[in-house]
Amino acid sequence: MSWDNYPPGAANDPRAPYNEVELPEVEFDCNVTQTLTIRTSVSTNNYIPEDDYDDVCGCRTTSYDTSDVNWDEEFASRGIGIPDLLEELKKRLDSEIENIPEEDRKGRKCWKYLRLKELSEACGGWKLEEQYAEED
């Protein structure tokens, strides 16, 4: 053992954990794909009603044939998707950013301004690659 408490020959070994240099962060462009799913109600008038007789309860019931419904189109015309939510969120964040006084954008109070700006920027640039809706 040497006087500096390193194992013999390890004091100048660049691979030793205590001699590793921490590299600075470098920014890289990348594509991120996230899959989200929501269970929601979608209204449609594109169905065929079929009257049935239920032997068990002895009453008439109605079932609906929705085999010809394009659920993607129905959701797109009536539902609110993630791109819509991001667009609305960005508008609200930008409005809130505009209302922050100039003196609160610097110094100790700037954390709120910086966070809102970061969130607003994160709302942009998203592209809907694929959407799939089906009846449950």
Image (spheres, helix red, strand yellow):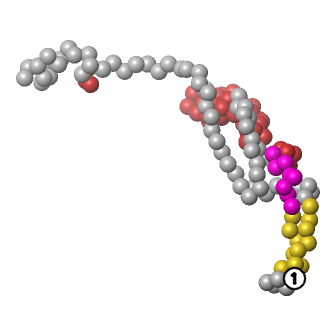
Q: Nearer the viewer, residue 1 or 3?
A: 1
**Quadrant of the rendered image containing residue 91:** top right
Pick the quarter of the image with the N terminus.
top left
**Residue at left offset 75%, top offset 41%:** 131
Q: Nearer the viewer, residue 95 or 43?
A: 43
Residue 69, image x, y percentages = 86, 52
Residue 29 visible, this orientation:
yes
Q: Amino acid at mark 1?
A: Cys
User: Eyeballing the image, is 25 above or below 54?
Assistant: above
Residue 44, image x, y percentages = 89, 55
Residue 95, image x, y percentages = 77, 35
**Residue at left offset 71%, top offset 55%:** 39
Q: Nearer the viewer, residue 113 or 59?
A: 59
The dominant secondary structure in magenta is loop
**Residue topped by disc 1:** 59
What kind of element bears circle 1? Answer: strand
Q: Is residue 9 magenta?
A: no
Total count of labels: 1
Q: Nearer the viewer, residue 80 or 131?
A: 131
Q: Which region shows up in magenta?
A: 65-72
Question: Does residue 24 appear left or right of residue 73 in this picture?
Answer: left
Q: Is residue 68 magenta?
A: yes
User: Eyeballing the image, is 59 above or below 135?
Assistant: below
**Residue at left offset 77%, top offset 56%:** 135
**Quadrant of the rendered image containing residue 83:** top right
